[in-house]
Image (cartoon, rainbow, N blue to C red):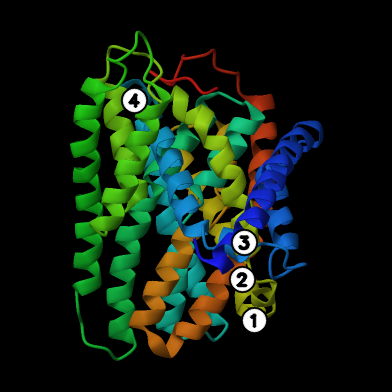
Amino acid sequence: MTEPLASQVPVALITLGVLFLLGLAADSLGHRTRLPRVTLLLGCGLLAGTAGFDLMPALLTEMYPVISIIALTMVAFLLGGELSVRTMREHGKAIVLISLSIVLVTLPLVAAGLWLVGVPLAAALVMGALATATDPAATYDVIRQTGVENRFTHTLKGIVAIDDAWGLIVFSMVIVLARTFDGGELSFWALRVSVVEVVGSLLLGLAIGVPAARLTGRLSKGEPLRIEALGLVFVTAGLSIWLELSYLIAGMTAGAVIVNLARHHTRAFHEIEHLQWPFMIIFFILAGASLEADALWMIGPAGLVYAAFRIGGRILGGWIGGTLAGEPLAARRWYGPALLPQAGVAIGMALIAADLLPQHGAMIMAMAVGTTIVFELIGPLAAAVTLARVARSLPQSPPDAESGDQSPS
């Protein structure tokens, strides 16, 4: 071990210990105050990062990409586990209609609003596509923290599970249009790459999920072992990155396959639920530490328009989709507010768009980063308030009543 690295290790380990204790404090404070622990952890990271007191060791911040992949792949497995045959039979129509409606309403609304305030059409279209992305980790954690289990939360988790697939497809189509409007040649490269990524990720999830459904839980009576859960998560994440596929879609697909095909146990992802929280603590704090507060001052009036129209688009889209799906009046108006968190997927889309549309790259990146900070902080709060309101209007589900083979912890 080199001397500089050796000198960083004690500081990194001490910091990790402090972060775990902060996570424990955030969990306790969240239960006492009803504040989402996601927002509390992001706030801690913001204070400890470059935007605050710059206390985070370099060795730890360098671990953020790996930790984020592990944490998000775990979330993907858990969300896929919500897509049991029983859940899809009862809520599949609502999941598809509401998710598609939110995408199809949010994109044109945000793009039109930005274009009307002077943003070039190509950049406005791209930002409209970015507005369709959500943060599955934040949304799922708020649901788990509140402990609300009813038809609204089951539908919500299903929407979050398939949302990234819609977002990737729509974004690839918009990039083709944006390049055309911006004077570039009509190329379907981006669309082809996105379709290959989605289809390839689904196939990888099937390739992992089918044998895993047959094998997990065979070594011990009842439920899969903790090491089996970790093995599946790491293999899925690693293969996805190696093959340049989406670990979110691959993990979600594998989770859905396992929960539907495995009949020799009842709680396919019980151990992932136990393992997930330590990774999520580090993930959210490091995510907060990576946020640049200066980006908020770069977005200007266009960023405010983006934020306002994204909120409006998701509320309107959720209402329309909920109405078409026949959802209760008490639930349909709350799907949009519950889906406001926005994170890594939007940043990833922005990086691709900045590369393909270099003349608008700086504007797209500044708005994507700045508005992501806003929605990562206010989104979980909105989701928590939404779940509290819905919990008073809809009956609570008994354990396993709607979640099929898996019940949340």
Task: Reply above or below: 301 against 59.
Answer: below
The residue identified by callout 2 is 370
Residue type at tag 3: Gln
Q: What is the CA distance from the residue labelled 1 to the residue labelled 2?
A: 7 Å
Residue to which mark 4 is pinned? 84
Question: Going from the N terminus, do you reach mark 3 or mark 2 first?
Answer: 3
- Residue 246: tell me if it is visible: yes
Q: Are marks 1 and 2 in contact (CB under 8 Å)?
A: yes
Q: Say above or below: 126 vs 135.
A: below
Amino acid type, mark 4:
Ser
Residue identifier under label 3: 8
Q: Is residue 380 above or below residue 109?
A: above
From the viewer's side, name the closer residue of 376 and 2. 2
Q: Secondary structure at mark 2?
A: helix
Depth check, mark 3 against mark 4: the one in front is: 3
Q: Amino acid at mark 2?
A: Gly
What residue sits 29% from the left and 27% below the top? 258
* Residue 171 location, quadrant: bottom left
Residue nearest the observer in this picture, 249 or 302: 249
Q: Nearer the viewer, mark 3 or mark 2?
A: 3
- As drawn, is 224 to the left or to the right of 208? right
Q: What is the crowding at mark 3: few (fewer than 14 residues within 10 Å), some, or many (at least 20)?
A: some
1 or 3: tag closer to the N-terminus? 3
Disc 1, disc 4: CB below 8 Å? no
- Give the mark nearest the N terminus, 1 or 4: 4
Categorize mark 2 by other alpha carbons within 10 Å: few (<14), some (14-19), many (20+): many
Disc 3 versus disc 2: distance between alpha carbons? 31 Å
